Image (cartoon, grey):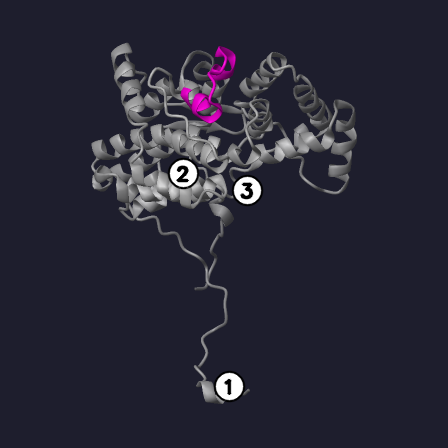
Amino acid sequence: MTGNVKINRGLKGVYFERSGVSDIDGAAGELSYRGYSIHDLATHSSFEEVAYLLIHGELPTAAQLADFDAALRAGRDLPPGVLGVIETCRDGHPMDVLRTAVSALAALDPASADNSEQGMIATGLRLTAQLPVLVAHHHAIREGRDPVAPDPELGHATNWLWMLKGQKPSAEAARLADVDFILHAEHGSNASSFAARVTIGTEAGLHGAITTALATLAGPAHGGAAEDVMKMVQDIGSPENAAEYVRAKRAAREAVTGFGHRVYRREDPRARHMRDGVRRLGEEMGAPQWYEILQAVVEAMKPYARHGLNVNVDFYSGVIYQLHGIPMDLYVPIFAIGRMPGWVIQCLEQARRNILIRPLTLYDGPPPRAYVPLQDRGT
């Protein structure tokens, strides 16, 4: 092909569809779900309410929320065969095990073939309920413990911590986990959501789309920042070392993990809620030094804020997980647990006005040439 063709590598700046779910203003540093500011939702709402809002488009009434919450709690049961899959993969990375288990659920869930809108919503609710169970059960199995059964008396975030640790979390810890899920619930056409839409575009089922999303999220360029931040904090060791750490990174032209975002030019609006949570949880658990190190890094990075290098949400998330004693290789699965309702509604939107997503690549290989038989190509 010849002529003037503009290449938008990574599809940067390309609008491929309309969406009524999340509104991201990168220049202003603002985010809303269905028209509601992320600040109001993180302050006043719950993950269950936000999941309902994302999937159904409006905040629920008390009766609607009760029914939705009951469906989530009822959906936590796993088909027996899934535990066998987890056992077989017990030594794998948690994201690999999670992706494999969700793929297996497609064959083990009799309703997985129902690709009607109501069928996809029901499947999405089950998968939203099942993801934390899958992650917690695998973690127990790889440690040689019996998995902790879900507690139907506990809400989504509280039950997650209960299954993972085998003890009931404090109200503050449970609320912070809930806020973490809210902040990660949806974020437009990010890599994993776009990948899920591509899968739905082929008229594949929701289990396949979520498997695709999980595989995409596992890449360190998308979901791994929280883990990298915790490694950075451990390398720094104390607040006094933060300025020198940043200076050395910048002198070597290396990125400081947790700063900058593909969309936001100002501070990620989700970060403030994680920042406050780290401070409170650190004080509650007698480990305030992690928050102090983070803030020292923020202070050292202030001169670079004018270049768009501001704090993103993952800067604080990893330390919250560390304070809970959660292994680093579970940080991305936790991201996935929170992102489930966003993936579900992105898939529903794609299915409602479906079109096969098939972008073009501009050929820049050799010009037309004659085929040379094998015997004439030399030795």
> Label 3 amino acid?
Pro
Viewer-side residue, 343 vs 81: 81
**Measured along the vertical axis of the image, is residue 281 above or below residue 96?**
above
Give the residue number, with chain letter if any, for mark 3: 220
**Measured along the vertical axis of the image, is residue 223 above or below residue 178?**
below
For mark 1, does the 10 Å Cα neighbourhood hold few (<14), some (14 to 19), or many (20 or more) residues?
few
Q: Where does the magenta region start and end?
A: 159-175
Is 78 on the left-hand or right-hand side of 267? left
Viewer-side residue, 227 vs 216: 227
Q: Secondary structure at mark 2?
A: helix
Give whichever of discs 1 and 3 has the lower sequence position: 3
Q: Are marks 2 and 3 in contact (CB under 8 Å)?
A: no
> Label 2 amino acid?
Ser
Give whichever of discs 2 and 3 has the lower sequence position: 2
Q: Secondary structure at mark 3?
A: loop
Give the residue number, with chain letter if any, for mark 2: 193
> Label 1 amino acid?
Arg
Q: Position of residue 346 (x, y in %)?
A: 35, 35
In the rendered image, which quarter contains the N terminus?
Answer: bottom left
Give the residue number, with chain letter if any, for mark 1: 377
In the rendered image, which quarter contains the C terminus?
Answer: bottom right
**Measured along the vertical axis of the image, is residue 63 above or below residue 269?**
above
Q: Position of residue 302 (x, y in %)?
A: 70, 25
Q: Position of residue 51 (x, y in %)?
A: 35, 23
